[in-house]
Amino acid sequence: MEDVAALAAVSAMTVSRALRDPTSVNTETRLRIEAAIDATGYVPNRIAGSLASRRTNVVGLIVPSLRNSLFAETIQGVSDALGAHHPLMIADSGYALAGEEAAIRAFLAQRICGIVLHNTQHTTRSRSMLEDAGIPCVETGNLTEKPLDMTVGFSNYDAACAMTEYLIGRGYKNIGFVSLPIHDNDRAAERRAGFLAAHQRRGLISAPELLLESPPGLRSGGLALATLIERVPAVDAVFLSGDVLATGALLEANRRGLDVPNKIAIVGSDDNELQEAVSPPLTTLRFPRYQIGHQAAEMLMKRLRNPSRDVSRLDLGYELIERASA
Amino acid sequence: MEDVAALAAVSAMTVSRALRDPTSVNTETRLRIEAAIDATGYVPNRIAGSLASRRTNVVGLIVPSLRNSLFAETIQGVSDALGAHHPLMIADSGYALAGEEAAIRAFLAQRICGIVLHNTQHTTRSRSMLEDAGIPCVETGNLTEKPLDMTVGFSNYDAACAMTEYLIGRGYKNIGFVSLPIHDNDRAAERRAGFLAAHQRRGLISAPELLLESPPGLRSGGLALATLIERVPAVDAVFLSGDVLATGALLEANRRGLDVPNKIAIVGSDDNELQEAVSPPLTTLRFPRYQIGHQAAEMLMKRLRNPSRDVSRLDLGYELIERASA
DNA sequence: TTGAAAGCGCTACCAC
DNA sequence: GTGGTAGCGCTTTCAA
């Protein structure tokens, strides 16, 4: 920076100012400085800047997994909203609360200016670190009643409940429910709770044998369907909530020559092109993943600009997409 | 840190040392310091540390898109290899060289210690900034002959050439080729070059009407197939290289009642569970996306530990997965 | 509109 | 094995 200043015949102070707020500097001076920056190939040192100003522009994001295309949507939303001015640090928790805590610790050491979490369940230590840090925080995975700070998303409970009531309404009696492993996964837990609540609300009882946890994946979905049919031959509908499980189940049903939805109904969640393209197209839930990421980042930046505490809970809802599989 | 030092009755210097290398400090001292850290809830300031030591542990990663599940594999590989000690900063270039340059500039301002790029094509400015920065750099998208620094991956050219020769070998005469837009995308360009080279090698000529660029997506793949059939009714095979294009084309063929592979062969790239699950299962190319990310990060860290210049080009190859669609 | 001085919270370096 | 001193490259604050 001294080099640039010398070349532009101003002080380092003026260069610093010109970089942060070009309007605060005389136009001619600014032009000279810009020329000098170009000539020297100067790249500002944000580390030094951050230390001096005691804040960074870096935003932290923690997702359960990086290879999951669901989270990829949210990540893209966050990244797009942040733009070039806010670098994005990403870590995955590996679907574990301890992993999340480790990532939070690492991020806080980097003095991130805000954080987006996909969990609404955290270790005690995670909570206290986040509170002590005093940075804005947006939780996105599940719309929680008492967020750490802000939250944006949809209610997994409501969504699962709605889909289950839909199935019950269409006359299905023995509905299977498949979710990802519930351990350390509040979203999966909420969905199962919603599934059970819908039964209760309609005065039905869901047999425990109809509840299944499954790893993610197309093949796993097929396997889950097979397991349920074997356990409960009378099963007449299956709600697979998570990843591509439902698509896997549908392909397996096709393979077995089972008539969907007449012999067995199959419904899913997290709509995508594929669920629409298969035959029959899947009835499913659609979640605004990209928008959630986008809004989360916007809320963060808004809070950064104006440290008030107004908008702190944003429900982006869900859609039940009715197609031909139920 | 002063607080911790006071509580542990040592100097700040010793706390700093204990944090960076616990073995360099007396065991009892270390225990006292750890207790003090616990008691105060101290979170080290890596910004200050980085400024003082003039280096960070932060690794930068730039991919064309964050929502693409292909890159998600690579990202996960990088993240896993880096572990908790190396925070990961991610940006997407939006499939544009200018986007990559902007991300590089932002990363260098953050003084990242190394960078992983998915491109092997860069703006002049990107190249010079990277050179001036003097940080290790791994290019991963396409195995290039003259990398900026290090490279790991596979040859898109060879892979596409192999698949095309496979098709030619099976007697197909009018082979269509669909890729993602080639502008600013060296991988797509290389694949097309490989496709053409295979024809040349076999003494065949590929009609220009059989070359198509398409946006990504299942639907786009179907559309691409339709376009090719309309343009060249005699087309007897289509090689769709990119994303889920091939799957989309296969589903479209099924919809139209076209016998695959007898009426028309369809082959793809970037194998995944779905390509295996559809009917007929797709003959395709498999790329070690996760391994590429993992190795890239490992190469980076190895170089960081030992600034030599030995391993700089790693070919992880590709596989041609022969299934029933050709 | 511009500049000088002080200092952000650490680590490098050297002394003990 | 431990501590003191200087300074990393900026921004803050205040003065001109």
Image: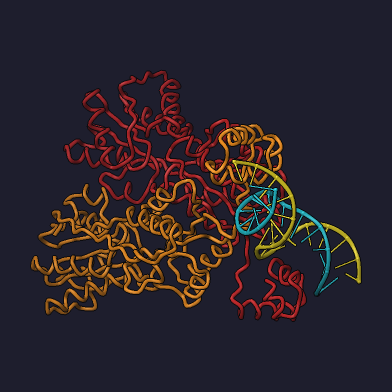
Chain colours: A orange, B red, C yellow, D cyan
Q: Is residue C13 above or below residue B106?
A: below
The x, y position of residue A27, in whole percent, is 56, 35
Q: Between A250 and A272, which is closer to the camera in this rendering?
A: A272
Q: Between A242 and B196, which is closer to the camera in this rendering?
A: A242
The C terminus of chain B, quarter of image? top left
The x, y position of residue A132, in whole percent, is 52, 73
Q: Is residue B75 above or below residue A23?
A: below
Q: Is residue A295 above or below residue B165?
A: below
The x, y position of residue A176, in whole percent, is 21, 70
Q: What is the count of numbered marks? A: 0
In the picture, residue A96 is in which quadrant?
bottom left
Query: Could you tell whether A119 is left or right of B263 in the image?
Result: right
The x, y position of residue A43, in whole percent, is 62, 42
Q: Between B248 and B186, which is closer to the camera in this rendering?
A: B186
* One can see residue B288 in this view: no
In the picture, residue A326 is in which quadrant?
bottom left
Query: Could you tell whether C2 is left or right of A280 in the image?
Result: right
The N terminus of chain B, quarter of image? bottom right
Q: Between B162 and B215, which is closer to the camera in this rendering?
A: B215
Q: Is residue A300 above or below residue A15?
A: below
x 37%, y 27%: residue:
B168
x 54%, y 62%: residue:
A107
x 47%, y 41%: residue:
B318
x 27%, y 41%: residue:
B248
Query: Could you tell whether A262 is left or right of A217 in the image?
Result: left
In the picture, residue A9 is in which quadrant?
top right
